Image (cartoon, helix red, strand yellow):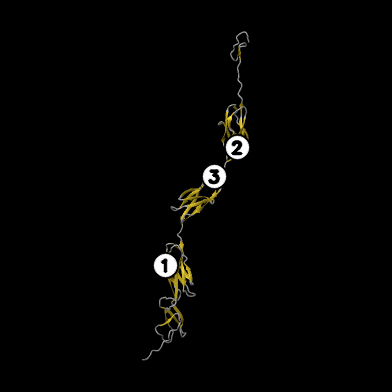
Amino acid sequence: MNTTALDIEAPGFDRDSGVGIVMVPAFAATYTIGGTVSGLGAGKSVGLLNNGGDGVTVNANGGFTFATALASGAAYNVTVGTQPTGQTCSVTNGSGTVGAANITNVAVACVNNPPSTYTIGGTVSGLGAGKSVGLLNNGGDGVTVNANGGFTFATALASGAAYNVTVGTQPTGQTCSVTNGSGTVGAANITNVAVACVNNPPSTYTIGGTVSGLGAGKSVGLLNNGGDGVTVNANGGFTFATALASGAAYNVTVGTQPTGQTCSVTNGSGTVGAANITNVAVACIVTAITGPTSTGTGTATATLTGAARPAASSPVAVVSWPNRRRRPRASASRTASSGSRPPAARPPTVG
């Protein structure tokens, strides 16, 4: 270089040699972004992003590094682009500014998701106006349904869990039954539980009472409303087989009288209320007595012709005397209780 001349040169040009010098600046230092993954399930993968791009897929627990290095002073922001199946991964230490070293402390932690849950429900039909039915799932988690239509229990169940819908409280005057009420939860809500309600039949009550005065070895046939017969073979209580609804009429009559007796009914008719009928009274009395004649050549039958009286009184009997040699009077009286023989026939008095 000529030292006597004014030494003014353009940058990058050697005046003495006439050769230009190209000035190449040094490259800025860059640093990688990475960290570790933990909790990732076997066979699963997680997709990570830096600054919304520069993705990396991690297939196992351990370290990871993004392919693109960043210059000192550049910002980085690591996020999860694709979650592993059945897991959720979260990032800590994921954002900041690159300094003068690689970033290695980004932490990606993965945990298993809770099982998917599904609701249990269905429909109610036949529920009476103003009525309600209480339903239970697995003995709890109750829901009260006040109208026909859909219902759903509040507590959802995981896939694979069992469910069992039952009726906890029946509606007044109705009975509800459940179909499709139990099973195992799959991968969808249960919506086909069916609860069908029907009206209960009216409450029914029996008709009965007592028989008195029935002779030993005898029987009386009783009827209610002209049918529903019952045969009573001894004194004491009786009950018809067919119960009647509240509000129904009953009418007890004698269908078959016992031999030699007549039975009559008191308190035999009325309307069924809200209790069994137990006060029907059937009283039987002797109406004919048969025995041998005084001569032993025939039998005599005493037939009661009077109305039934208290036990202290005796009805009147009419006795016929067949096969007797002498003709008795047209009718003779005796008392059924005394058992006395009728007076013998007397020859007419000659005046």
Q: Is residue 180 above or below residue 295?
A: above
Q: Is residue 231 visible?
A: yes
Contact check, label 3 and label 1, Cβ < 8 Å: no
Question: Looking at the picture, how far across and down is residue 146, in whole percent?
Answer: 46, 50
Q: Which residue is mark 2?
A: 109
Question: Looking at the picture, how far across and down is residue 295, in whole percent?
Answer: 46, 86
Disc 2 secondary structure class? strand
Residue type at tag 3: Thr
Residue at mark 2 to residue at mark 1: CA–CA distance:
87 Å
Say which of 268 and 349 sits in front: 268
Say which of 15 and 74 sits in front: 74
Which numbered dot is residue 196?
none
Q: Is residue 84 above or below residue 124?
A: above
Q: Quadrant of the N terminus?
A: top right
280 sits left or right of 37 in the view: left
Question: Looking at the picture, how far across and down is residue 140, in whole percent?
Answer: 53, 50
Which numbered dot is residue 117?
3
Say which of 200 and 210 sits in front: 210
Badge 3 or badge 1: first in the primary sequence:
3
Residue at mark 3 to residue at mark 1: CA–CA distance:
64 Å
Q: Which residue is mark 1?
A: 269
Badge 2 or badge 3: first in the primary sequence:
2
Residue type at tag 2: Ala
Contact check, label 2 and label 3, Cβ < 8 Å: no
Disc 3 secondary structure class? strand
